[in-house]
Image (cartoon, rainbow, N blue to C red):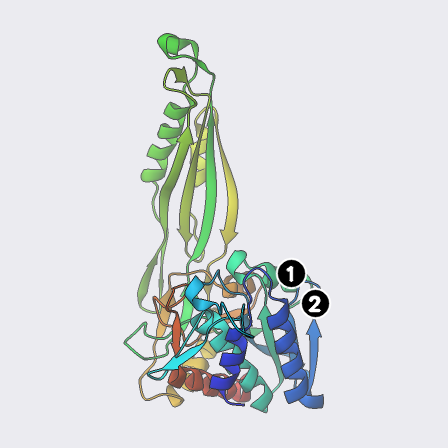
Amino acid sequence: MNVTELTRELVSIPSYEDETAAGDFIETWLGREAGGDATITRDEVGNVIARKGEPAPQTLALVGHHDVVEPAPSQVQDEGESSGEYVVDERDGRLYGRGTADMNGAVAAAMLAFVEADPTGELVFASFVGEEVGGVGARHAIDAGFAPDYAVVGEGSTGYSSPGVTDVAVAHKGRRGSTITATGATAHASEADAGENAVYRATDAVGIVRNLERPAVDVAGDRLEGSVVVTEIQGGTAMNVVPDRCEITVDERTVPGERAALERVEGIEGVEWTVDQDLPPMQCGDEGFADAVREAASAAQPGTPEHVTKPHATDAGWLADAGTDCVVCGPAEPGEAHTDDESVSIEVLERCRETYRHVAESWPQ
């Protein structure tokens, strides 16, 4: 089976909200194609993990995820025997459908590379569930002892340095979402001094957020800058009532090693700060590994790949946070994921398959 056929099979399987069928397919396919060379496991949350090769001091993993975001109506078959399956179209050298770019195409390339490679040591394939909802699968696997020394995560890295070139991302931003809650004391608006206005306290907090220094770090010749943005505010119950509660949500894009000092808002009376989601950033700590993956990517394509950075959080953040040296290298291009006409280049899928296989056969050194 070639990478186009395997991608078509994977993409056609509904995997929004319930990834079971996609996991079943991956597990069965690996069991059949890898034969007795690999050990395939399926954990209680649905992650599929396969291992082959001789145990070595260092382990390399090819990592992806088989969940997707909600498809558009046009991306789902609505009649006939295939009703409910996801639509997959091929035209102009690309595959179109939910999950082609993010990221069943990369999962298919990694599955084939895993089966075909003659690794230098232990090679691991992992496809996680729940990446789109905060890295549920990756976090579960890490808590259960999943700890490769190195990982190539197949999220998109194509078209960053120049159009059509599959680069190697050596760092990406994380995301911390939080809530600032201001409380006060209610009163009639005609006697405002009898209360404590929670909206005023909240706007004082907004002032602090607006003036916070944004963390930044230099990586691969880029200035990777974080951001802190107030995105929602809600408070008050009526036009003539002093509000006793006001909530603000904050979207913060984090960078490796630094965070904005949002805790400063708690210096205001009646204000609390709560972290709701914290997706960690990633930075590869092994230049030799990053160079080796870039060399493999260069050998697989006519263009010249570069080390780049990504603005989006991926499962590489969770792995890096747990001690794995990661890079991101995959077929998706900026702007393709999560769109109603999501697509991926077939040529680039083949390129990634070859890149993954080459890395597996040359690393660890």
Q: Is residue 124 left or right of residue 205?
A: right
The dot on residue 43 is: 2
The dot on residue 85 is: none
> Could you tell me residue 110's position as x and y percent?
53, 80
> Could you tell me residue 85's position as x and y percent?
53, 71
Above/below status of 136 relative to 155: above
Above/below status of 307 relative to 205: below
Above/below status of 122 relative to 277: below
> Could you tell me residue 94's position as x and y percent?
37, 80
Q: CA distance from mark 1 to mark 2?
A: 9 Å
What's the residue type where badge 2 is placed?
Answer: Asp
Q: In which image quadrant can residue 92 be found?
A: bottom left
Q: Is residue 211 visible?
A: no
The dot on residue 140 is: 1
Q: Is residue 110 visible?
A: yes
Quadrant housing the N terminus: bottom right
Q: Are marks 1 and 2 in contact (CB under 8 Å)?
A: yes
> Could you tell me residue 353's position as x and y percent?
48, 85
In this orientation, which residue lies closer to the viewer: 362 or 184?
184
Label 2 packing within 10 angstroms: few (<14), some (14-19), many (20+): few
